Image (cartoon, rainbow, N blue to C red):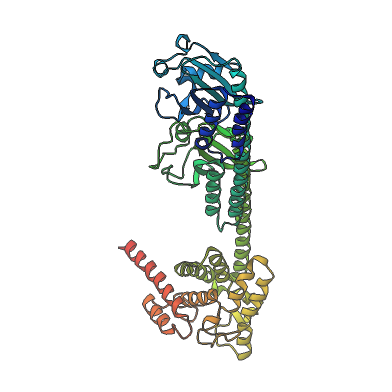
């Protein structure tokens, strides 16, 4: 067994593993060699738990083959010797292995005659067991104490590696969490925000997949998910568990039952049976918007993930609350716009319904031109209010059926500048104000009030002008009947490149022809 100095050297070899990369296959051979030298063993097994209190150990076998020839994950109860060593309160000495209750033929066949075991523990942390074997004779009297020292030293090494790993994982989780929350907050729309939330949950929880489920009046809907583990339908799902209102995460032992309860089918990406599933409420204050559903890869939840999931869900709840407030503000905006438009229509009977029709057509043309959602909103406002400045024009001029004098025309032409001035005083209409000012500018530069030409005219104003022109041509006026669609299209094409932007005219014609085709099919 060697001298005291050799014992110290062997223990130092084990202690030195604290600087070796924390990979069990790299640690185990050196630790086994040191234990063999320390206690004079012919063979060594090192059995280390995957996680604290786990029932599986990762076994490294050196010198004696286990019943399962390949080293790897092993249920503790599957091997009588490993189970006996694990259940022992301290070191276990078996001088006559052949006669022991844990004796097995495959080890006797390899000549095992004596066994020593020691728990690999550091304080309250139980990392596993060390098992030493001898073939020809029993172990020396002090071997138990030496193996216990080796096991304790190895436990300290493993505890140090675990702490480092936990620190690294926590740091990585914090970085993932920061990226996910920043991406969610900066997302261009609600769908993208919820997707970033689900993707962030997969990262911080080391999950198989994650999904965002949002409450609706009649149930819930799948707002976002990673991968294709969940199949359709994504809407019309059953209500989320009522216990979510308590605001605490809920862990389900089998995902299949929960998904069935919610009315969600599993997709083609893999079997979710037997997986642990977490439902983390998505809330902002007392209001619960839904839940973050997370399917875990591990067979037991890591307690450290719940704080990260709560942060992600809370961030998503804040986004949803802001989206709801934004929707309410949008509705208020639309009410204001409608009130302004109604005031205009009440003043100028000739333009009754003109603003609404122009707005609907302008939004369709803007969609045809692939404008962004924010631009479409500004376009809708600008089209509804493009003549709002006429509120400041005397009634006798607006209602005049005959020709206007030069002075009266000057009043009328000022309505675009007046309209811009009115709208610039309303924060949410400032972006539409410039389009209202330029809504009568011509592509060739012959319009008013600034004589802009070509692409110097704001695109929204070019769209409003073209749609305004179409609606005027195809509507009855006190001084003439509406033009036919064919005649209006001919005149529109004739003005492309003169009064009107050719690209806008092309999009407008596509929209009106598509509408006319649909109407003709319905009539047929």
Q: Is residue 226 above or below residue 54?
A: below
Residue 404 visible from this viewpoint: yes
Q: Outermost residue, front direction? A: 3
Judge by depth and name the residue closer to the eye, 181 or 5.
Answer: 5
Q: Is residue 53 above or below residue 229?
A: above
Residue shown at the point (49%, 36%) measured from the top left: 25
Judge by depth and name the residue closer to the eye, 196 or 204.
Answer: 204
> In the rendered image, which quarter contains the N terminus?
top right
Q: Outermost residue, left direction? A: 524
Task: Please provide percent x and percent y for residue 187.
Answer: 57, 56
Q: Is residue 91 above or below residue 186?
A: above
Task: Please provide percent x and percent y for residue 398.
Answer: 60, 79
> In the rendered image, which quarter contains the C terminus?
bottom left
Judge by depth and name the residue closer to the eye, 150 or 323.
Answer: 150
Task: Please provide percent x and percent y for residue 204.
Answer: 57, 43
Task: Please provide percent x and percent y for residue 448.
Answer: 58, 85
Residue shown at the point (38%, 75%) measured from the top left: 485
């Amino acid at each position: 067994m060697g001298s005291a100095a050799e014992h110290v050297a062997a223990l130092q070899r084990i202690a030195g593993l604290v600087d070796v990369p924390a990979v069990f296959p790299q640690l185990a051979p050196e630790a086994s060699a040191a234990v063999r030298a320390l206690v004079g063993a012919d063979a060594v097994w090192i059995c280390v738990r995957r996680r604290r209190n786990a029932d599986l150990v990762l076994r490294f076998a050196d010198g004696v083959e286990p019943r399962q020839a390949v080293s790897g994950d092993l249920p503790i109860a599957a091997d009588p010797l490993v189970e006996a060593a694990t259940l022992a309160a301290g070191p276990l000495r078996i001088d006559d292995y052949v006669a022991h209750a844990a004796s097995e033929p495959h080890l006797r066949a390899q000549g095992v005659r004596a066994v020593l075991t020691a728990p690999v523990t550091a304080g309250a942390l139980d990392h596993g067991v060390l098992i030493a074997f001898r073939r020809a004779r029993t172990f020396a009297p002090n071997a138990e104490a030496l193996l216990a020292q080796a096991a304790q030293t190895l436990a300290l090494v493993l505890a140090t590696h675990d702490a480092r790993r936990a620190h690294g994982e926590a740091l990585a989780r914090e970085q993932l969490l920061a990226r996910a929350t920043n991406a969610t907050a900066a997302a261009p729309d609600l769908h993208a925000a919820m997707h970033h939330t689900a993707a962030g949950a997969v990262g911080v929880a080391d999950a198989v997949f994650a999904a965002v489920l949002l409450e609706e009046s009649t149930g819930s809907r799948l707002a976002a998910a990673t991968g294709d583990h969940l199949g359709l339908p994504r809407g019309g799902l059953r209500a989320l568990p009522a216990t979510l209102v308590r605001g605490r995460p809920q862990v389900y032992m089998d995902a299949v039952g929960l998904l069935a309860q919610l009315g969600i089918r599993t997709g083609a990406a893999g079997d979710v049976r037997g997986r642990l599933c977490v439902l983390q409420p998505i809330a902002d204050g007392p209001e619960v918007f839904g839940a973050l559903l997370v399917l875990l890869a591990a067979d037991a939840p890591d307690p450290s993930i719940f704080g990260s999931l709560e942060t992600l869900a809370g961030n998503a709840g804040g986004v949803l609350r802001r989206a709801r407030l934004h929707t309410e503000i949008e509705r208020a905006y639309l009410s204001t716009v409608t009130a302004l438009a109604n005031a205009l229509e009440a003043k100028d009977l000739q333009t009754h319904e003109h603003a609404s029709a122009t707005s609907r057509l302008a939004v369709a043309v803007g969609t045809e031109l692939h404008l962004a959602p924010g631009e479409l909103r500004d376009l809708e406002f600008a089209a509804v209010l493009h003549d709002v400045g006429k509120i400041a024009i005397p009634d006798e001029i607006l209602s005049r059926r005959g020709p206007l004098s030069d002075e009266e025309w000057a009043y009328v032409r000022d309505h675009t500048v007046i309209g811009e001035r009115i709208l610039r005083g309303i924060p949410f209409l400032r972006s539409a104000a410039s389009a209202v000012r330029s809504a009568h500018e011509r592509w060739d530069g012959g319009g008013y009030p600034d004589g802009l030409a070509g692409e110097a005219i704001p695109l929204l104003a070019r769209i409003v002008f073209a749609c305004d022109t179409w609606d005027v041509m195809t509507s009855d006026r006190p001084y003439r009947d509406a033009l036919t669609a064919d005649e209006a299209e001919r005149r529109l094409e004739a003005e492309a490149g003169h009064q009107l932007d050719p690209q806008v005219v092309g999009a407008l014609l596509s929209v009106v022809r598509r509408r006319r085709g649909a109407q003709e099919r319905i009539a047929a």
